[in-house]
Image (cartoon, rainbow, N blue to C red):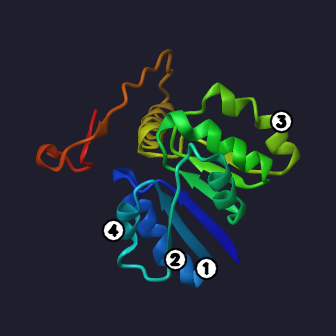
């Protein structure tokens, strides 16, 4: 049985929690969602009685290490400044690490050891940069298929909009 730990229950966590929770039982996963604010976790997992709630503070290294030790896969949705700390715990305890944040130098420095332990350390898996990367590749692939030569490419990423400002099909601002 896979034990998945999602760290962070903020605004961007809802869709991932819903997705993982819907497949957890049939896939044989145990899903735990942890955040500093236990009420935020309880709100996000309320429709899913099989999902476990936990509270933690990233500043408490012992509690963070214990929480990570009980998982096989850790998905960190914490702010970018905490990603290296989570990755360090994952590396020390041989746990897989996934993050939506950009890849900082501190995590790049863990690459050799992570590979030597056959650990999956994936970063940049979110809406930004994920959506802009996928959209860009689709455009570039279509242009290449038409015989175009691409000499330069710049991406000006975007952000999620407030619901009252979401006036395009992707609900995304470019």
Q: How far apart are marks 1 and 4 (CA)?
A: 23 Å
Q: Reading the chain from its start, which is encountered first: label 4 or label 2?
A: 2
Q: Within 10 Å of the Cα at label 2, are there few (<14), some (14-19), or many (20+) other Cα atoms?
A: few
Horizontal side of 129 relative to 157 (left or right) equals right
> Looking at the image, which residue sits at the far top?
151
Q: Do the residues labelled 2 and 1 touch (CB within 8 Å)?
A: yes
Label 3 belongs to which residue?
112
Label 4 belongs to which residue?
43
Q: Do the residues labelled 1 and 3 touch (CB within 8 Å)?
A: no
Q: Is residue 97 above or below residue 150?
A: below
Q: Distance between the residues labelled 3 and 2?
A: 32 Å
Label 1 belongs to which residue?
27
| In front: label 3 or label 4 | 4
Residue in the image at 17% along x and 50% along y: 163
Q: Where is residue 154 in the image (x, y as percent from the top left)?
A: 43, 20
One can see residue 122 in this view: no
One can see residue 41 in this view: yes
Q: Is residue 156 above or below residue 4?
A: above
Q: Reading the chain from its start, which is encountered first: label 1 or label 4?
A: 1
Number of numbered discs visible in the structure rendering: 4
Q: How far apart are marks 3 and 4 (CA)?
A: 39 Å
Q: Where is residue 76 in the image (x, y as percent from the top left)?
A: 55, 50
Label 2 belongs to which residue?
23
């Amino acid at each position: 049985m896979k034990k998945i730990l999602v760290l962070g229950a903020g605004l961007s966590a809802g869709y991932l929690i819903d997705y993982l929770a819907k497949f957890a039982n049939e896939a044989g996963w145990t899903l735990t969602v942890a955040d500093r604010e236990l009420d935020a976790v309880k709100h996000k997992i309320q429709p899913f009685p099989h999902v476990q709630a936990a509270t933690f503070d990233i500043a408490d290294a012992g509690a963070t290490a214990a929480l990570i030790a009980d998982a096989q896969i850790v998905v960190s949705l914490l702010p970018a400044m905490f990603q290296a700390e989570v990755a360090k715990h994952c590396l020390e305890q041989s746990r897989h690490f996934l993050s939506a944040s950009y890849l900082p130098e501190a995590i790049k420095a863990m690459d050799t050891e992570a590979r030597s332990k056959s650990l999956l350390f994936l970063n940049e898996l979110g809406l930004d940069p994920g959506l802009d990367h996928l959209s860009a590749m689709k455009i570039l692939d279509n242009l290449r298929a038409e015989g175009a030569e691409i000499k330069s490419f710049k991406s000006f990423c975007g952000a999620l909009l407030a619901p009252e400002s979401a006036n395009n099909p992707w609900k995304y601002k470019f």
